[in-house]
Amino acid sequence: MQLMTLARWLAHKAVKEEWRAQGTKVQYIEASEIAAAANLYLVQHMAELMKEAAIRHMVTAFPYIGVYARALSRFQRRCL
């Protein structure tokens, strides 16, 4: 559930970025039109959005994973 919510948010963000790059003022577009475009984008880019959502979820849910991973890597290099 959380990953799909994040993926949908990323799709909304991507659609809005695309439209802004084309010069469209997103604040004047109906929310339903943005949602429809985001749903289409989500279907077309499901794998990459889910991957990005999983990464963002891990980073926010476990903020010290990167710190622990680097410490483990240093420890393994020293001991091996």
Image (spheres, helix red, strand yellow):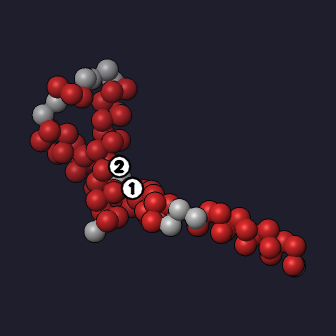
Q: Residue at x 28, y 59 (%)?
A: 5
| Residue 44 in sight here | no
Helix, strand or loop at label 1? It is helix
Q: Which mark is residue 18?
A: none
- Tell me which amino acid carries mark 1: Leu
Give whichever of 9, 71 is nearer the camera.
Answer: 71
Q: Position of residue 18 (x, y in %)?
A: 35, 33
The mark closer to the camera, 2 or 1, is 2
- Tell me which amino acid carries mark 2: Leu
Q: Position of residue 43 (x, y in %)?
A: 28, 55
In the rendered structure, which disc, 2 or 1, sits on the residue that comes first in sequence? Answer: 2
Position of 20 with respect to 36 (left or right) is right
Rendered image quadrant of residue 61: bottom left
| Residue 66 in sight here | yes
Q: Which residue is mark 1?
A: 49
Rendered image quadrant of residue 29: top left
Q: Is residue 76 above or below residue 66?
A: below
Q: Residue at x 79, y 68 (%)?
A: 74
Q: Is residue 78 above or below residue 20?
A: below
Which residue appears farthest toward the bottom when viewing the image?
Answer: 80
Position of 27 with respect to 48 (left or right) is left
Q: How far, Cα to Cα, is label 2 from label 1?
A: 7 Å
Q: Residue at x 80, y 75 (%)?
A: 76
Q: Is residue 8 above or below residue 72?
A: above
Within-10-Å neighbours for mark 1: few <14, some 14–19, many 20+:
many
Q: Which mark is residue 10?
A: 2
**Marks 2 and 1: CB-CB under 8 Å?**
yes
Query: Is the N terminus in the top left, top right, bottom left or bottom right quadrant?
Result: bottom left
Q: Position of residue 44 (x, y in %)?
A: 31, 52
Which residue appears farthest toward the top when viewing the image?
Answer: 23
Helix, strand or loop at label 2? It is helix
